[in-house]
Image (cartoon, rainbow, N blue to C red):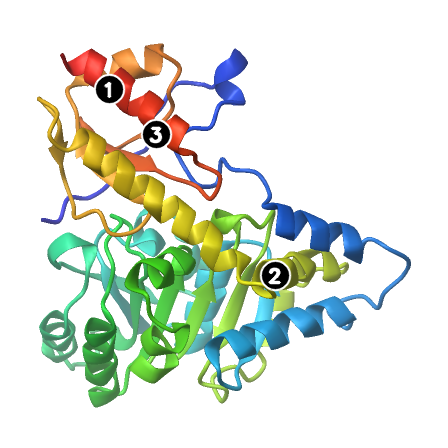
Amino acid sequence: MSSAPSSRTLPSAQGSTASRRQFASDNYAGIAPEAWMALAEANSGHAPAYGNDPWTQRAADAIRDLFETPCDVFFVFNGTAANSLALAHCCQSYHSILCHDVAHIEKDECGAPEFFANGSKLLLLLGENGKLNPSGIEEAVLRRNDIHYPKPRVVSITQATEVGTLYSPAEVRAIGAMAKKHGLRLHMDGARFANAVASLGVAPREITWQAGVDVLCLGGTKNGIHVGEAVVFFNRDLAREFDLRAKQGGQLCSKMRFVAAPWVGMLQNGAWLRHASQANRMARLLHSLIHNLPQVRILFPQEANSVFVDLPKTTIQALYGRGWLFYNFIGEGGCRLMCSWDTTEEDVRAFAADLRATVA
Protein backbone atom coordinates (compact mmCIF):
# COMPACT_ATOMS: atom_id res chain seq x y z
CA MET A 1 0.00 0.00 0.00
CA SER A 2 1.08 3.61 -0.40
CA SER A 3 -0.59 6.19 1.79
CA ALA A 4 0.85 9.68 2.11
CA PRO A 5 1.67 10.85 5.63
CA SER A 6 -0.49 13.71 6.80
CA SER A 7 0.67 16.59 8.94
CA ARG A 8 1.77 15.13 12.25
CA THR A 9 -0.46 15.86 15.18
CA LEU A 10 -0.19 15.10 18.89
CA PRO A 11 -1.05 16.89 22.12
CA SER A 12 1.48 19.08 23.88
CA ALA A 13 3.69 17.26 26.39
CA GLN A 14 2.97 18.36 29.94
CA GLY A 15 4.08 17.32 33.42
CA SER A 16 5.25 13.73 33.77
CA THR A 17 4.40 13.06 30.13
CA ALA A 18 7.36 15.16 29.03
CA SER A 19 9.93 12.91 30.77
CA ARG A 20 8.22 9.59 30.08
CA ARG A 21 9.73 7.42 27.31
CA GLN A 22 7.36 7.85 24.40
CA PHE A 23 6.60 6.35 20.99
CA ALA A 24 6.28 9.56 18.99
CA SER A 25 9.83 9.75 17.66
CA ASP A 26 13.30 8.33 18.17
CA ASN A 27 14.36 11.98 18.30
CA TYR A 28 12.73 12.12 21.74
CA ALA A 29 15.45 9.91 23.24
CA GLY A 30 18.48 11.32 24.99
CA ILE A 31 22.16 10.82 24.25
CA ALA A 32 23.51 7.28 24.39
CA PRO A 33 26.13 6.77 27.14
CA GLU A 34 28.89 5.93 24.66
CA ALA A 35 28.26 9.16 22.76
CA TRP A 36 28.06 11.16 26.00
CA MET A 37 31.37 9.78 27.28
CA ALA A 38 33.16 10.56 24.03
CA LEU A 39 31.74 14.06 24.08
CA ALA A 40 33.04 14.57 27.60
CA GLU A 41 36.47 13.24 26.65
CA ALA A 42 36.64 15.66 23.74
CA ASN A 43 35.87 18.54 26.09
CA SER A 44 39.40 18.79 27.39
CA GLY A 45 41.82 21.56 26.53
CA HIS A 46 42.15 23.13 23.09
CA ALA A 47 41.92 21.49 19.68
CA PRO A 48 42.11 22.86 16.13
CA ALA A 49 38.84 24.25 14.78
CA TYR A 50 36.73 23.55 11.67
CA GLY A 51 37.36 19.81 11.59
CA ASN A 52 41.13 19.85 11.78
CA ASP A 53 41.08 18.10 15.13
CA PRO A 54 41.94 14.48 16.02
CA TRP A 55 38.35 13.59 16.91
CA THR A 56 37.02 14.45 13.46
CA GLN A 57 39.79 12.43 11.82
CA ARG A 58 39.07 9.46 14.07
CA ALA A 59 35.34 9.64 13.36
CA ALA A 60 35.86 9.82 9.59
CA ASP A 61 38.29 6.90 9.72
CA ALA A 62 35.83 4.89 11.82
CA ILE A 63 33.16 5.40 9.16
CA ARG A 64 35.61 4.30 6.44
CA ASP A 65 36.36 1.19 8.47
CA LEU A 66 32.65 0.56 8.95
CA PHE A 67 32.06 0.52 5.19
CA GLU A 68 35.35 -1.20 4.40
CA THR A 69 36.24 1.23 1.63
CA PRO A 70 37.89 4.59 1.01
CA CYS A 71 35.22 7.31 1.06
CA ASP A 72 34.93 11.02 1.72
CA VAL A 73 33.14 11.91 4.97
CA PHE A 74 31.63 15.26 5.94
CA PHE A 75 29.79 16.07 9.16
CA VAL A 76 26.78 18.41 9.19
CA PHE A 77 24.33 19.46 11.87
CA ASN A 78 21.17 17.61 10.82
CA GLY A 79 19.43 15.39 8.31
CA THR A 80 17.80 18.21 6.39
CA ALA A 81 21.22 19.67 5.62
CA ALA A 82 22.72 16.27 4.85
CA ASN A 83 20.03 15.29 2.35
CA SER A 84 19.59 18.69 0.78
CA LEU A 85 23.25 19.48 0.29
CA ALA A 86 24.10 15.98 -0.92
CA LEU A 87 21.29 16.06 -3.48
CA ALA A 88 22.24 19.56 -4.59
CA HIS A 89 25.79 18.33 -5.14
CA CYS A 90 24.53 15.52 -7.37
CA CYS A 91 22.64 17.60 -9.90
CA GLN A 92 22.14 20.92 -11.62
CA SER A 93 19.14 23.20 -11.19
CA TYR A 94 17.57 21.95 -14.44
CA HIS A 95 17.72 18.31 -13.31
CA SER A 96 15.16 16.27 -11.37
CA ILE A 97 15.40 13.88 -8.44
CA LEU A 98 13.32 10.69 -8.47
CA CYS A 99 11.95 9.72 -5.06
CA HIS A 100 8.97 7.95 -3.50
CA ASP A 101 5.89 10.07 -2.93
CA VAL A 102 6.17 9.50 0.85
CA ALA A 103 9.92 10.16 0.99
CA HIS A 104 11.14 12.36 3.81
CA ILE A 105 12.75 14.75 1.32
CA GLU A 106 9.29 15.33 -0.16
CA LYS A 107 7.09 15.35 2.92
CA ASP A 108 9.21 16.76 5.72
CA GLU A 109 12.03 18.99 4.45
CA CYS A 110 10.03 22.19 3.82
CA GLY A 111 11.34 22.37 0.24
CA ALA A 112 14.98 22.37 1.37
CA PRO A 113 16.27 19.99 -1.36
CA GLU A 114 14.79 22.18 -4.09
CA PHE A 115 16.04 25.32 -2.33
CA PHE A 116 19.64 24.21 -1.97
CA ALA A 117 19.66 22.73 -5.49
CA ASN A 118 18.46 26.06 -6.89
CA GLY A 119 15.20 24.59 -8.14
CA SER A 120 15.90 20.95 -9.05
CA LYS A 121 12.51 19.29 -9.14
CA LEU A 122 11.46 16.27 -7.09
CA LEU A 123 9.59 13.81 -9.31
CA LEU A 124 7.39 11.58 -7.16
CA LEU A 125 7.03 7.89 -7.90
CA LEU A 126 4.75 5.24 -6.41
CA GLY A 127 5.80 1.90 -5.01
CA GLU A 128 4.50 -0.68 -2.58
CA ASN A 129 5.31 -0.21 1.11
CA GLY A 130 7.14 3.07 0.61
CA LYS A 131 9.76 1.65 -1.75
CA LEU A 132 10.83 2.53 -5.27
CA ASN A 133 11.25 -0.19 -7.87
CA PRO A 134 13.44 -0.35 -11.00
CA SER A 135 10.55 -0.39 -13.47
CA GLY A 136 9.07 2.77 -11.98
CA ILE A 137 12.43 4.50 -12.19
CA GLU A 138 12.87 3.51 -15.82
CA GLU A 139 9.36 4.67 -16.72
CA ALA A 140 10.09 8.09 -15.22
CA VAL A 141 13.38 8.37 -17.10
CA LEU A 142 11.84 7.38 -20.42
CA ARG A 143 8.61 9.34 -19.96
CA ARG A 144 10.00 12.36 -21.77
CA ASN A 145 13.32 13.55 -23.15
CA ASP A 146 12.41 16.96 -24.52
CA ILE A 147 13.96 20.23 -23.43
CA HIS A 148 10.82 21.25 -21.51
CA TYR A 149 11.19 18.40 -19.01
CA PRO A 150 13.51 18.48 -15.96
CA LYS A 151 16.00 15.77 -16.88
CA PRO A 152 16.22 12.97 -14.27
CA ARG A 153 19.67 12.94 -12.71
CA VAL A 154 19.36 11.40 -9.24
CA VAL A 155 17.46 8.55 -7.61
CA SER A 156 16.89 8.95 -3.87
CA ILE A 157 15.88 6.02 -1.68
CA THR A 158 15.31 5.91 2.08
CA GLN A 159 16.70 3.10 4.27
CA ALA A 160 14.70 2.37 6.42
CA THR A 161 11.80 3.93 4.54
CA GLU A 162 9.46 6.56 5.87
CA VAL A 163 6.92 3.82 6.62
CA GLY A 164 9.39 1.56 8.41
CA THR A 165 10.08 -0.94 5.66
CA LEU A 166 13.47 -2.03 4.32
CA TYR A 167 15.15 -2.42 0.97
CA SER A 168 16.86 -5.81 0.79
CA PRO A 169 20.41 -5.95 -0.63
CA ALA A 170 18.96 -7.38 -3.85
CA GLU A 171 16.47 -4.51 -4.12
CA VAL A 172 19.18 -1.89 -3.63
CA ARG A 173 21.37 -3.62 -6.22
CA ALA A 174 18.52 -3.68 -8.73
CA ILE A 175 17.87 0.04 -8.24
CA GLY A 176 21.61 0.73 -8.42
CA ALA A 177 21.84 -1.16 -11.71
CA MET A 178 18.88 0.75 -13.14
CA ALA A 179 20.39 4.06 -12.06
CA LYS A 180 23.69 3.17 -13.69
CA LYS A 181 21.91 2.06 -16.87
CA HIS A 182 20.46 5.53 -17.29
CA GLY A 183 23.40 7.54 -15.99
CA LEU A 184 21.67 8.48 -12.73
CA ARG A 185 23.33 8.99 -9.37
CA LEU A 186 22.00 7.06 -6.39
CA HIS A 187 21.47 8.84 -3.08
CA MET A 188 20.43 7.07 0.12
CA ASP A 189 18.70 8.85 2.98
CA GLY A 190 19.98 6.78 5.89
CA ALA A 191 18.45 8.56 8.86
CA ARG A 192 17.71 5.08 10.28
CA PHE A 193 20.44 3.24 8.43
CA ALA A 194 21.63 1.57 11.63
CA ASN A 195 18.19 0.05 12.17
CA ALA A 196 18.23 -1.27 8.62
CA VAL A 197 21.65 -2.91 9.04
CA ALA A 198 20.63 -4.43 12.37
CA SER A 199 17.40 -5.85 10.97
CA LEU A 200 18.82 -7.14 7.69
CA GLY A 201 21.89 -8.64 9.34
CA VAL A 202 24.19 -7.50 6.55
CA ALA A 203 27.49 -5.67 6.34
CA PRO A 204 26.94 -1.94 5.66
CA ARG A 205 28.85 -2.22 2.38
CA GLU A 206 26.29 -4.71 1.02
CA ILE A 207 23.48 -2.14 0.93
CA THR A 208 25.57 0.89 -0.03
CA TRP A 209 28.59 1.15 -2.32
CA GLN A 210 28.59 -2.52 -3.35
CA ALA A 211 24.97 -2.05 -4.45
CA GLY A 212 25.63 1.14 -6.41
CA VAL A 213 24.99 3.90 -3.84
CA ASP A 214 27.01 7.03 -4.66
CA VAL A 215 26.30 9.03 -1.52
CA LEU A 216 24.78 8.10 1.84
CA CYS A 217 23.41 10.47 4.45
CA LEU A 218 24.27 8.46 7.55
CA GLY A 219 22.03 9.23 10.51
CA GLY A 220 23.27 9.49 14.07
CA THR A 221 20.72 11.55 16.00
CA LYS A 222 17.96 8.95 15.80
CA ASN A 223 20.33 6.35 17.20
CA GLY A 224 21.72 8.13 20.26
CA ILE A 225 23.94 10.98 19.07
CA HIS A 226 23.02 14.46 20.30
CA VAL A 227 23.45 16.31 16.99
CA GLY A 228 25.13 15.67 13.67
CA GLU A 229 24.81 13.49 10.59
CA ALA A 230 27.53 12.25 8.23
CA VAL A 231 27.49 12.70 4.46
CA VAL A 232 29.46 9.78 3.03
CA PHE A 233 30.55 9.91 -0.61
CA PHE A 234 31.47 6.49 -1.98
CA ASN A 235 31.74 8.16 -5.39
CA ARG A 236 34.75 10.24 -4.45
CA ASP A 237 34.78 12.21 -7.70
CA LEU A 238 31.30 13.41 -6.79
CA ALA A 239 32.57 14.70 -3.45
CA ARG A 240 34.81 17.30 -5.04
CA GLU A 241 34.24 20.72 -3.40
CA PHE A 242 31.44 19.46 -1.16
CA ASP A 243 33.32 21.09 1.71
CA LEU A 244 32.67 24.45 0.06
CA ARG A 245 28.97 23.67 -0.37
CA ALA A 246 28.69 22.66 3.27
CA LYS A 247 30.38 25.88 4.37
CA GLN A 248 28.10 27.99 2.16
CA GLY A 249 25.11 26.11 3.56
CA GLY A 250 26.03 27.05 7.13
CA GLN A 251 27.11 23.50 8.02
CA LEU A 252 30.77 23.94 8.90
CA CYS A 253 30.93 23.67 12.67
CA SER A 254 33.75 25.71 14.17
CA LYS A 255 34.08 23.34 17.13
CA MET A 256 33.68 20.27 14.93
CA ARG A 257 35.14 17.90 17.53
CA PHE A 258 31.86 18.12 19.45
CA VAL A 259 29.93 16.93 16.38
CA ALA A 260 32.47 14.23 15.51
CA ALA A 261 33.43 12.81 18.91
CA PRO A 262 30.10 11.04 19.62
CA TRP A 263 30.56 9.11 16.37
CA VAL A 264 33.82 7.72 17.73
CA GLY A 265 32.06 6.61 20.90
CA MET A 266 29.22 4.99 18.99
CA LEU A 267 31.33 3.22 16.37
CA GLN A 268 34.46 2.07 18.18
CA ASN A 269 32.86 -0.86 20.05
CA GLY A 270 29.72 -1.48 18.01
CA ALA A 271 27.39 0.58 20.22
CA TRP A 272 25.63 2.01 17.14
CA LEU A 273 24.45 -1.47 16.14
CA ARG A 274 23.54 -2.59 19.66
CA HIS A 275 21.34 0.44 20.18
CA ALA A 276 19.65 0.02 16.80
CA SER A 277 19.05 -3.66 17.54
CA GLN A 278 17.42 -2.76 20.85
CA ALA A 279 15.03 -0.35 19.14
CA ASN A 280 14.19 -2.99 16.53
CA ARG A 281 13.54 -5.65 19.18
CA MET A 282 11.15 -3.37 21.01
CA ALA A 283 9.24 -2.65 17.81
CA ARG A 284 8.94 -6.39 17.14
CA LEU A 285 7.66 -6.92 20.65
CA LEU A 286 5.16 -4.09 20.30
CA HIS A 287 3.92 -5.53 17.01
CA SER A 288 3.51 -8.98 18.57
CA LEU A 289 1.46 -7.56 21.46
CA ILE A 290 -0.96 -5.40 19.49
CA HIS A 291 -1.40 -6.79 15.98
CA ASN A 292 -4.27 -9.10 16.95
CA LEU A 293 -6.17 -6.61 19.09
CA PRO A 294 -9.71 -5.71 17.96
CA GLN A 295 -10.00 -2.47 15.95
CA VAL A 296 -6.22 -2.45 15.43
CA ARG A 297 -5.01 -2.72 11.84
CA ILE A 298 -1.31 -2.92 10.94
CA LEU A 299 -0.64 -0.69 7.93
CA PHE A 300 2.84 -1.77 6.81
CA PRO A 301 5.16 -4.70 7.44
CA GLN A 302 7.10 -4.25 10.69
CA GLU A 303 10.75 -4.41 9.67
CA ALA A 304 12.79 -1.82 11.59
CA ASN A 305 12.05 0.19 14.75
CA SER A 306 8.49 1.34 14.08
CA VAL A 307 4.96 -0.01 13.94
CA PHE A 308 2.37 1.71 11.74
CA VAL A 309 -1.17 1.04 12.87
CA ASP A 310 -4.64 2.34 12.12
CA LEU A 311 -6.62 3.10 15.28
CA PRO A 312 -10.10 4.44 15.97
CA LYS A 313 -10.14 8.15 16.72
CA THR A 314 -11.58 7.51 20.17
CA THR A 315 -8.72 5.13 20.94
CA ILE A 316 -6.14 7.71 19.88
CA GLN A 317 -7.67 10.32 22.15
CA ALA A 318 -7.93 7.86 25.03
CA LEU A 319 -4.24 7.00 24.74
CA TYR A 320 -3.33 10.68 24.61
CA GLY A 321 -5.44 11.08 27.74
CA ARG A 322 -3.39 8.39 29.47
CA GLY A 323 -0.23 10.38 28.77
CA TRP A 324 1.09 8.61 25.69
CA LEU A 325 2.53 10.62 22.79
CA PHE A 326 2.71 9.35 19.21
CA TYR A 327 2.12 10.83 15.80
CA ASN A 328 -1.17 10.56 13.96
CA PHE A 329 0.86 10.08 10.81
CA ILE A 330 -1.38 8.94 7.97
CA GLY A 331 -4.89 10.19 7.33
CA GLU A 332 -7.38 10.19 10.20
CA GLY A 333 -6.30 7.12 12.16
CA GLY A 334 -2.93 6.00 10.81
CA CYS A 335 -0.44 6.24 13.68
CA ARG A 336 3.31 5.73 13.84
CA LEU A 337 4.66 4.05 16.98
CA MET A 338 8.43 4.58 17.05
CA CYS A 339 10.82 2.74 19.34
CA SER A 340 14.13 4.30 20.38
CA TRP A 341 17.53 3.05 21.49
CA ASP A 342 16.44 3.42 25.12
CA THR A 343 12.92 1.96 24.82
CA THR A 344 12.45 -0.84 27.34
CA GLU A 345 10.24 -3.91 27.47
CA GLU A 346 8.38 -2.29 30.37
CA ASP A 347 7.60 0.74 28.18
CA VAL A 348 6.26 -1.45 25.41
CA ARG A 349 4.12 -3.63 27.68
CA ALA A 350 2.69 -0.60 29.47
CA PHE A 351 1.65 0.99 26.19
CA ALA A 352 0.24 -2.26 24.83
CA ALA A 353 -1.78 -2.77 28.02
CA ASP A 354 -3.28 0.71 27.74
CA LEU A 355 -4.06 0.16 24.08
CA ARG A 356 -5.73 -3.15 24.90
CA ALA A 357 -7.81 -1.45 27.58
CA THR A 358 -8.97 1.35 25.27
CA VAL A 359 -10.11 -0.96 22.47
CA ALA A 360 -11.72 -3.55 24.77
10 Å neighbourhood of mark 1: few (<14), some, or many (≥20)?
many
Asked whether the residues under the numbered discs 2 and 1 touch, taking CB atoms below 8 Å apart as contact, a structural biologist would say: no
Q: Nearer the viewer, residue 146 or 290?
A: 290
How far from the left and from the top, in percent, is residue 216? 43, 70
Q: Amino acid at mark 1?
A: Leu
Q: Secondary structure at mark 1?
A: helix
Q: Nearer the viewer, residue 145 or 52?
A: 52
Q: Secondary structure at mark 2?
A: helix
Please tell me which of labels 3 and 1 falls first in the chain: 3
How far from the left and from the top, in percent, is residue 240? 55, 84
Q: Amino acid at mark 2?
A: Trp
Q: Secondary structure at mark 3?
A: helix
Please tell me which of labels 2 and 1 falls first in the chain: 2
The tag on residue 348 is 3
How far from the left and from the top, in percent, is residue 330? 21, 36
Circle count: 3
Q: Nearer the viewer, residue 319 or 91?
A: 319
Please tell me which of labels 2 and 3 falls first in the chain: 2
The tag on residue 231 is none
Q: Which residue is mark 2?
A: 263
Residue at 46%, 28% in the rendered image: 21
How far from the left and from the top, in percent, is residue 347? 40, 27
Q: Which residue is mark 1?
A: 355
Q: Would residue 244 be visible to someone looking at this image?
A: no
Residue at 47%, 77% in the rendered image: 67
Q: Amino acid at mark 3?
A: Val
